[in-house]
Amino acid sequence: MNYQECIEYLYEKLPMFSRTGDAALKLNLDNTWALCRYLDMPQEKFPSVHIAGTNGKGSVSHLLASVFQEAGYTTGLYTSPHLKDFRERIKVNGKMIQPEQVVHIVKRLQPIIEEIEPSFFEVTVAMAFHQFAEEEVDIAIIETGLGGRLDSTNVITPILSIITNIGLDHVSILGDTHESIAREKAGIIKPGIPVIIGSTQETTRPVFLATAQHNESSILFADQVVSSTITERLPDRITVALLGSNEEQSQVFQTPLSGAYQQENICTAVAACKQLVRDGWKLTDTAMKKGMLHVIKNTGLHGRWEVIEKNPLIVLDVAHNKEGMEKVVAQINEFSFKHVYLIMGTSADKDVDGILKLLPKSFTYGFTEAAIPRAMKKEQLLQKATAAGHTGKVFENVNKALDEFKRLAEPDDLIIVCGSIFVVGEVDRT
């Protein structure tokens, strides 16, 4: 098989949650353990940081990886899903896994794939662990896919666990309350391993405290030990000042991740860095500042209030649930745009009605759908939006919507694409 044949084999052979939803899930770790044993337990050959959460886990993963890179460590980064290229999921020092390496690992795994019929995600996790072991990374930053307790990544024993926040997402799988979802995410907390919680929420705090106590793990709530304020906010960057409880001088971080919601993610990442420093990792203040500043260049993070054009401002954001969309709307309201054009597609399993209620009726809307079976049909989305009092029309795809809105928009308007990572991934950037 060549690379393209390998990718087609993975897509066609293996059930994939991002395309088909719940049917692709294997709600145990048996296959992942089998794959890891087949590859000689690669996850045991490098230290790792494990990151879960409803929103923000991707940004925190990239921020930490960027800091480690700036500190001189060979850094693995596993994230999901990808925007455009499968290889985005597996990176070392910001460079995607090479096509020939994908071919090598798939060929090696093919006998056990045929035997146990794992999911797409289970195989990609095993591939990442194998690649990180082969490249002898100093550290790997591992983002969970969905949940935590039964997530395929949860076969690692990390040096630090991080849970960013809890929101009502994937309720059919994780539970329909903040407490039940928190219990699933808390499944990444390991005996004796420190855990950092990004956001203190009254409904979930007791769950995390009880789980940490049961595991005899130290626990720290980042927003209780680090206070922060945004000192500069521009459409393409923010500056955040952080003050720890035992520090007289504030630390100032600038990042091109310009969504105001990144303030919370920066706090979480800095709290994690300080814990890792206490454990002996050499993450200097300079490395932290450069890591935050160069995160896009270092790790290739996209789709977080990502400005791709100006005059009018065109922004891509992968917000796809109520909590994420609330933050996007708050970000829009920080600026004085003359008019806002919002292009939206979503997955059928999301709380679409709840999301639509958050969106202003003054916006002009374009409704579309990603080219995946799991997507909500654009006509259904328009119907729901109309019932919620919004004005808009359907477009065959996101790029046709962008073309029309670019013709209509004036220089001081905003065009934003959001609602689904898959819709954002289909934006033509050329």
Image (cartoon, rainbow, N blue to C red):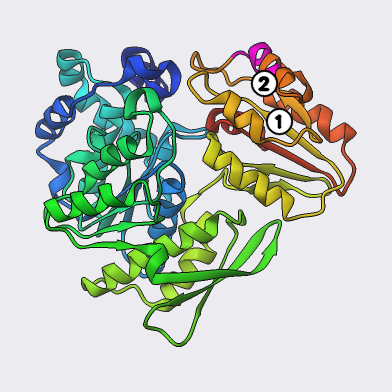
Residue range in magenta is 377-382
| Amino acid at circle 2 | Thr
Disc 1: which residue: 343
In the displayed structure, 361 sits above or below 352; it is below
In the displayed structure, 102 sits above or below 274; it is above
Disc 2: which residue: 368
Q: Residues within 10 Å of mark 1 (few under 14, many from 20)?
A: many
Indicate the position of residue 170 as horizontal and vertical percent values: 40, 28
Mark-to-mark CA distance, 1 and 2: 7 Å
Give yes or no for contact between labels 1 and 2 (Cβ–Cβ under 8 Å): yes
Indicate the position of residue 18 as horizontal and vertical percent values: 43, 24
Q: Main secondary structure of the magenta part?
A: helix
Residue situated furthest bottom in the rendering: 248
Horizontally, residue 26 falls left or right of residue 324, namely left
User: N-terminal of the two: label 1 or label 2?
Assistant: 1
Q: Nearer the viewer, residue 407 or 364?
A: 364
Residue occupying the point 41% across, 55% down: 199
* Quadrant where the image shows the N terminus: top left
Q: Residues within 10 Å of mark 2 (few under 14, many from 20)?
A: many
